[in-house]
């Protein structure tokens, strides 16, 4: 059987955000923070903004990828530790006004964040929260108000799911790469992260075979969704990320999932590495590398120490700046 583990390591490197882009995003993040601090000091002195990177780009997750269009994103939460005396929409608008003009493209006032677009390069989303003693974090929702949301709790939950070899992080990135390649209203990165974590508890992780672990994860996800099609956020607000899926969107996702499982089974049982890689490429796209045109009868050895170091996850404490 063809062992495509090494090809998956190359694919992981290909979809990971390169240091050069991370450095640019970090510089832009700091520039946006400076704009907001200065604007609020001048125009809204009763509000002191604080900041924290969260989501897939946060220090406890590290599951961000760059899309096939070479776009990536970063979530930089804006926090106020006081109860606002203006509406959620107004507070979002103040953030939007503060960062307007920082990029050539006007910032977008989206439902749950202000989006800063760095054309054909990356996006920085700025969700807005407030927190007072004894209450959950409150997320601003445009034209709606405030809703319970705790990005720290979600990051902590994911951190507890991770394995010491960093394989879960890679599996999430592979799933996100698949969704990006297929598109057609595939599930969000958060949904795929939750589904992968839930599946991890039910399967045996094969550390030296990412191809097998990914296949087994997809099978467990489908098994669960066949019984009940939902994806519940495991922390506040505990909502169902699939709640608004219509029949067509659900059927498209489930069909794509079954097709991926079928080809993953065939690829794992295929003796020729090149033929196996072509099957993976059907779902992961052209960034998944070609294998060698050779037959394999035995599995390859475990990954090197250097390879494991490349995928190790470094945890950092939660902190606001």
Image (cartoon, helix red, strand yellow):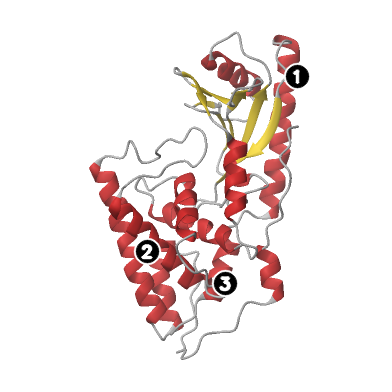
Q: Quadrant of residue 260?
A: bottom left
Q: Is residue 74 visible?
A: no
Q: Quadrant of residue 80?
A: top right
Indicate which disc residue 48 carries: none
Rounded to the nearest angstrom, the CA distance separating label 2 from label 3 is: 17 Å
Q: Residue at x 53, y 69 (%)?
A: 8
Give the crowd class for mark 2: few <14, some 14-19, many >=20 residues within 10 Å. Answer: many
Residue named by callout 3: 207
Q: Is residue 264 visible?
A: yes
As rendered, which of 125 and 88 lies closer to the eye? 88
Classify mark 2: helix, strand or loop: helix
Residue named by callout 2: 219
Upstream in sequence: badge 3 or badge 1: 1
Residue named by callout 1: 38
As rendered, which of 137 and 26 lies closer to the eye? 137
Q: Residue at x 51, y 85 (%)?
A: 299
Q: Residue furthest left?
A: 247
Q: Quadrant of the C terminus?
A: top right
Classify mark 1: helix, strand or loop: helix
Relative to 279, is 142 above or below? above
């Amino acid at each position: 059987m063809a062992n495509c583990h090494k090809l998956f390591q190359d694919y992981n490197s290909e979809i990971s955000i390169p240091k050069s882009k991370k450095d640019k995003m970090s510089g832009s993040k700091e520039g946006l923070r400076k704009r907001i601090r200065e604007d609020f000091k001048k125009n809204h002195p009763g509000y002191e903004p604080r900041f924290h990177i969260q989501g897939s780009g946060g220090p406890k997750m590290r599951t961000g990828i760059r899309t096939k269009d070479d776009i990536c994103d970063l979530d930089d939460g804006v926090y106020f530790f006081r109860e606002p005396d203006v509406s959620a929409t107004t507070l979002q608008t103040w953030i939007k006004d503060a960062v307007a003009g920082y990029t050539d493209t006007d910032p977008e006032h989206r439902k749950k964040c202000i989006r800063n677009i760095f054309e054909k390069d990356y996006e920085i989303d700025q969700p807005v929260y407030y927190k007072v003693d004894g209450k959950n974090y409150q997320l601003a929702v445009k034209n709606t108000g405030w809703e319970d949301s705790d990005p720290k709790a979600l990051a902590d939950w994911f951190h507890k799911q991770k394995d010491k070899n960093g394989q879960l992080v890679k599996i999430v990135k592979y799933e996100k790469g698949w969704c990006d390649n297929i598109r057609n209203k595939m599930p969000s990165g958060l949904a795929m992260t939750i589904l992968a974590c839930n599946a991890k508890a039910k399967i045996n992780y094969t550390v030296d075979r990412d191809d097998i672990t990914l296949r087994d994860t997809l099978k467990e996800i489908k098994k669960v969704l066949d019984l009940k099609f939902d994806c519940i956020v495991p922390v506040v607000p505990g909502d169902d990320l699939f709640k608004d899926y219509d029949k067509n969107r659900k059927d498209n996702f489930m069909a794509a999932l079954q097709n991926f499982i079928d080809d993953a089974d065939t690829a794992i049982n295929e003796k020729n590495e090149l033929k196996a890689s072509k099957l993976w490429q059907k779902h992961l796209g052209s960034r998944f590398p070609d294998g060698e045109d050779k037959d394999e009868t035995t599995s390859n050895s475990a990954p090197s120490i250097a390879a494991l170091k490349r995928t190790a996850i470094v945890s950092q404490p939660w902190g606001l700046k």
